[in-house]
Image (cartoon, coloured by chain):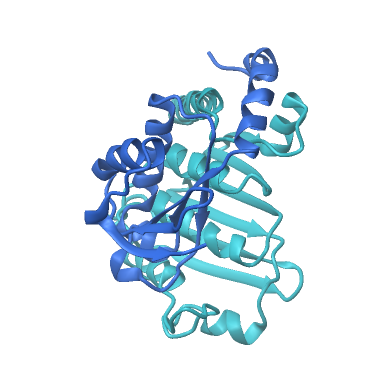
Chain colours: A cyan, B blue
Amino acid sequence: MNDIALHILDIIQNSLAAGASVITLYINEDLLGFLVFSVEDNGKGMSEEMVQQVCDPFVTTRTTRKVGMGLPLLSMTTSQSGGTLSIKSKLGQGTTVRATFCNANVDRPPLGDVVKTIIILLVGNPQVRLIVHYGVGTYSFTYDTQEIQQVLGLKEVDYSVPELTAWVREYLTQEITKVREEGEKK
Amino acid sequence: MKSLEDLKALREKLQSDMKVRREAGTKIIIGMGTCGIAAGAREVMAAILDELSLQNLKDVQVQQTGCIGMCEKEVLVDVVKPGEPRITYGKVTPKDVKKIIVDHVMHGKIVEELVVGKIEQ
């Protein structure tokens, strides 16, 4: 994984595999010197025992092979960049994964293309409600797929329609730029 | 400046475009497990969306799936056309996408050199 946005895409795949219908992605580029992201879902959750073991690559729920690399890789990246990884989960209720990376650490990977990650998630999973809170310090904006559904008057929005993909790309880029400008002024 | 108002203006066009896609025959499925993502699945999927838009293909559905156990052959892209075998392409890069879409999806000619699997429906 070359950048943090790819880790985000990967961690959200776990939520999807756990059958989540609502996923909240929180990203803050600068929270007291740390880049922070968290993924909260209402999927099937994990037992306490599983939470303890989940950063071991030889523990996975997958049936196609016996290793799972997603969380172990994220765990390695956070600790190499002076950050932390925490996983909270309750069976039947959902899971929250929170990762922090020290911005001053030279080993912190670049954030990468968050907009592309979000678009891929939206296109691939029209049935899931995705809520994105994007911030820099105390400035933030929210993108909620439910709001877009209401505007379009549709139960399920197909984000692969080019005009919509283009609108989302420009809208997210514009809002992230605004938040960054506000965050940097301070 | 883009706003939610722009979307309202596009509403009817988007609704009818989405209806065409829902009834679409052809599906493209991208492997989006950790193995796929690490091998470049995000860029491949973005390239597929760009190419569909460029070719103005409205009747193709794009989906994603998890790891299917052929991690060493990621990025995996499946093309499923109605009444034809499901074709799995392996080690796909963004530069292969145009050939897969133009030759296979549009003209029905399988890109043999990239095929790693064929499943009869």
Up/down of A123 relative to A49, above or below:
above
Task: Give x and y (percent) for residue A110.
Answer: 32, 47
Task: Give x and y (percent) for residue A115.
Answer: 46, 37
Tally of numbered tags: 0
Instruction: Name which residue lies at 66% across and 20% down.
Output: B4
Task: Give x and y (percent) for residue A78.
Answer: 39, 64
Instruction: Name which residue lies at 59% across and 49% down.
Output: A25
Using residue B26 as the reference point, say whether residue A48 is left or right of it: right
Which residue is outermost to the left?
B113
- Front residue of A179/A18: it is A18
Q: Is residue A124 visible?
A: yes
Picture quadrant of residue A2: bottom left
- Front residue of A115/A29: it is A115
Task: Give x and y (percent) for residue A20.
Answer: 68, 60
- Front residue of B17/A176: it is B17
Instruction: Name which residue lies at 62% across and 26% down.
Output: B17
Picture quadrant of residue B106: top left
Q: Is residue B91 visible?
A: no
Using residue B4 as the reference point, say whether residue A64 is left or right of it: left
Instruction: Name which residue lies at 25% across and 54% down.
Output: B112
